[in-house]
Amino acid sequence: MSFSEKDRTLTSTDASVPVGAHALGDALALLRASPPLVQCITNIVVAQWSANVLLAAGAAPAMVDNQNEAGLFAAAADAVLINLGTPYNDTAEAMLAAVTTAVANATPWVLDPVAVGPLAWRTELAHALLAVGSPTVIRGNASEILALGGGTGGKGVDSLDTPEAALTAAQSLALRYDTVVAVSGAVDHITDGNRTVRVSNGHPVMTQVTGVGCALGALIAAFAGTVDDPLIAATAATAMLTVAADGAALSSIRPGSFAVALLDELSDVSPGSLAERVRLS
């Protein structure tokens, strides 16, 4: 296992899965050593929660989402998150401006296509953003990923499909856009079209806290602004959040106290404990 701080490239010698556990620990060490500035254009329900998750993990959040500044700020950010949870006309313009800048500056950006499929306008917006330039990572639940590939989608923000059912669509999207697709669920599936990693950590109570999935998109952006391999970035973020959730569930599986415990656990996860506790296949 080795990484270069100069080029942020991590390599793994673990041949059992495409991404080794120690590569994830090294990614976290690198993030903590040089906290990435993550611009979040996200939904109004989860903005504060996403910022707190980033802070607990060791990254620096910036919720610059207005159309007058979003494009300019993206030039200074280490990574950009675009979350379609509650889009408005002005935030849509801000998203397009930020992505245009990110693509022009080769800045990593993450697309979270919340509730695409049944809602036509945001689905068109998602495809308009993809037309500007390929994201570093697309993160969504199984129904959202299927919808982005041409399916009907889920029930609002809820998935009606499993990550396993969406894997073929995820691989196709990854190859089409030269990106990594992270499909969230009971077992998270992460693929670049050729390599696929599964993360089996996490707890069902995560689905009872608003914004956990959206915050994962922000965390993926943070790791994408830290390491060069998007598959490692998406897997490290997913592993960190779900390993922290395992720890938080030991304290409480009631949604309110679990949410607080999850932030505490995120701040406590170390590179070594991440590598030791993650379950990869």
Image (cartoon, helix red, strand yellow):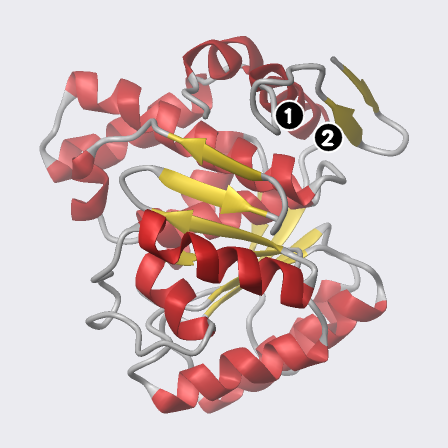
Q: CA distance from mark 1 to mark 2?
A: 6 Å
- Residue 175, numbered label: none
Res 98 visible? yes
Q: Tell me the element at label 2.
A: loop
For the point 26% across and 32% down, the residue is 260
Q: Residue furthest right?
A: 6
Amino acid type for the residue under numbered disc 2:
Ser
Tell me: 10 left or right of 280.
Answer: right
Q: 166 or 23, which is in the foreground?
A: 166
The residue identified by callout 2 is 34
Q: Residue at x 76, y 40 (%)?
A: 228
Residue 69 appears in the picture as rendered: no
- Residue 130 x %, y %: 62, 75
Tag of residue 32: 1
Name the one closer to the observer, 67 or 220: 220
Tell whether 1 sits left or right of 19. Answer: right
